Image (cartoon, helix red, strand yellow):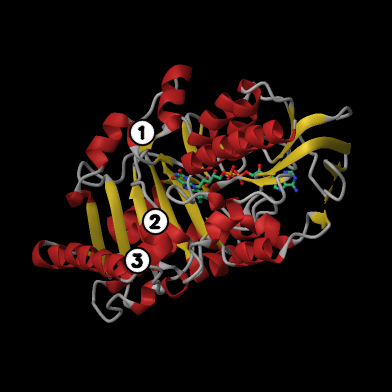
Amino acid sequence: MTGERDVVVIGAGSAGLSAAKELERLGISTTVIEGSHRIGGRAYSEELLPGTWFDLGCAWLTDGDANPFAGIADRLGIALGRATWDAYNKPENHRFIRNGKRLGGDDHAACRRYYTDSYAAITAACGNGADAAISEVIDLESPCAPPFIESIATGWGVDVDGVSCADNVSSVGALGYPVPRGYGNLVAAWGADVPVTLNARAERIDWSGAGVVVETPKGTVKARRALLTVSAGMLASGEIAFGPGLPDWKLEAIAGLPMGTENKMGIAFDKDVFGPDGRGYHSVWSDDGTSAKVDVNGMGFNAVSVFTGGRHAVWLEKQGPQACRDFAVDRIAEVFGNGIRKHVLRAITTAWNSEPWTRGSWACALPGQAHQREHLARAIEDRLFFAGEATQVGGQGTCDGAYRSGVRAAREIAAALKRSS
Ligand SMILES: Cc1cc2nc3c(=O)[nH]c(=O)nc-3n(C[C@H](O)[C@H](O)[C@H](O)COP(=O)(O)OP(=O)(O)OC[C@H]3O[C@@H](n4cnc5c(N)ncnc54)[C@H](O)[C@@H]3O)c2cc1C
């Protein structure tokens, strides 16, 4: 970690790794420091059972083949679930389960219509600088509101009263291909050729002189420019000290983009308990107020991912892994009956709200604050640069959005270095 480099990249998630690769391609000397013991950040896979992978963070490639990781996976020989996705992505595969009963016919159609109408209302609420919280523009009293509210909470990690319509509309990209062997594994394989100093968290960044000096437990790194790719939650935590402090406009951007929480529970079964008609995603809710999204067999395994978001996700996470597991199994039983319980083999539950390296799942703009993503992305005095999913408009909250932001920031740095030479 000695010797001055052109750039120090802070964080080795998708954004930091793509930036490092682009800087290398442009012939700019770079060092990457990562606080944790591994690369990948929020892209991280674990084996639920031998051969059955579960992604604790990103799992689906948004936008199919337009996603840069689709081409990367093909080059690395890592299979994508293209056929699985085609089978999964059908309107009839979105099931609505209320009080343990599957809605059919007109009731199913009414809920599908409610989703279409709600998205139209969200779109109509913004434009020309206007914005509102989603809760202000949808019909909260509809019998179909609970699953939609849950879908926003899981999609954004924040409940409808805290989600900006403008931010929602600017986020492009539908869920796309699954990665049966793990999106996290794909990112780790792709990033393996980037030299990264692990367990080297940036504790203090001094940018008072001509360059930057970054203090880590492993020593000091000097560079002409710094690129921060840590989450907005990490920036908000104050764990990285800046000298001088960040300007007010940057602090306002960070405050306008608080982290949401989506948690996932992966439940593996000893056999196919879902039946031939079981695959797909289920919006499950009860009149007592519980709700969740239940993805069945999306990766082609005998496994289910149960999602919860917003305040409930934060609360449930605090109850601990056993409570998360029980919540998930209860929701799956609402769809497939209590007989499934004896077939549960293993569970993995996430705890993103208290995850020390991210402080949440992704950044979600407060109503009226969607423009802060552009401010978060903007460099400070051509010296401190910013990337990461939160800086992206269109693709925010995604792994490919993070990738694109890293490439964007690398090119900005190249231009800045050219200006100063
Ligand atoms: C539950 C969940 C589900 C998701 N599902 C999807 C999905 O299906 N599809 C999709 O595309 N995206 C999904 N995402 C989002 C996607 O995972 C993220 O947007 C993306 O991985 C973020 O990449 P990043 O590089 O911006 O940040 P990160 O991956 O967070 O990388 C930042 C890195 O900085 C490191 N760091 C933090 N502090 C310091 C410090 N002080 N010094 C040095 N290093 C530090 C961290 O350890 C981390 O490795 C999901 C995320 C979650 C949590």
Above or below, 337 against 229 in this view is: below
Residue under label 3, please give it.
127
Classify mark 1: residues with Cα within 10 Å, few (<14), some (14-19) or many (20+): few
Which residue does the image show at 38% across and 36% down from the upper left? 178
Q: Amino acid at mark 2?
A: Ser
Q: Residues within 10 Å of mark 2 (few under 14, many from 20)?
A: some
Depth check, front residue: 34 or 250: 250
- In this view of the protein, which residue sits in the foreground, 359 or 377? 377
Outermost residue to the left: 105
Query: Which amino acid lies under the numbered mark 3 shown in the image of this protein?
Result: Gly
| Amino acid beneath label 1 | Ala
Image side of residue 91 versus residue 395, left or right: left
CA gap between label 1 and label 2 equals 17 Å
Closer to the observer: label 1 or label 2? 2
The residue at which mark 1 appears reads as 66
**Quadrant of the rendering where the C terminus is positioned:** top right
Q: Residue 397 in the image: state x and y as whole percent.
A: 49, 51
Residue drawn at (85%, 36%) of the image? 222
Question: Which residue carries the number 2 mark?
Answer: 170
Q: Nearer the viewer, mark 3 or mark 1?
A: 3
Q: Is residue 222 left or right of residue 312?
A: right
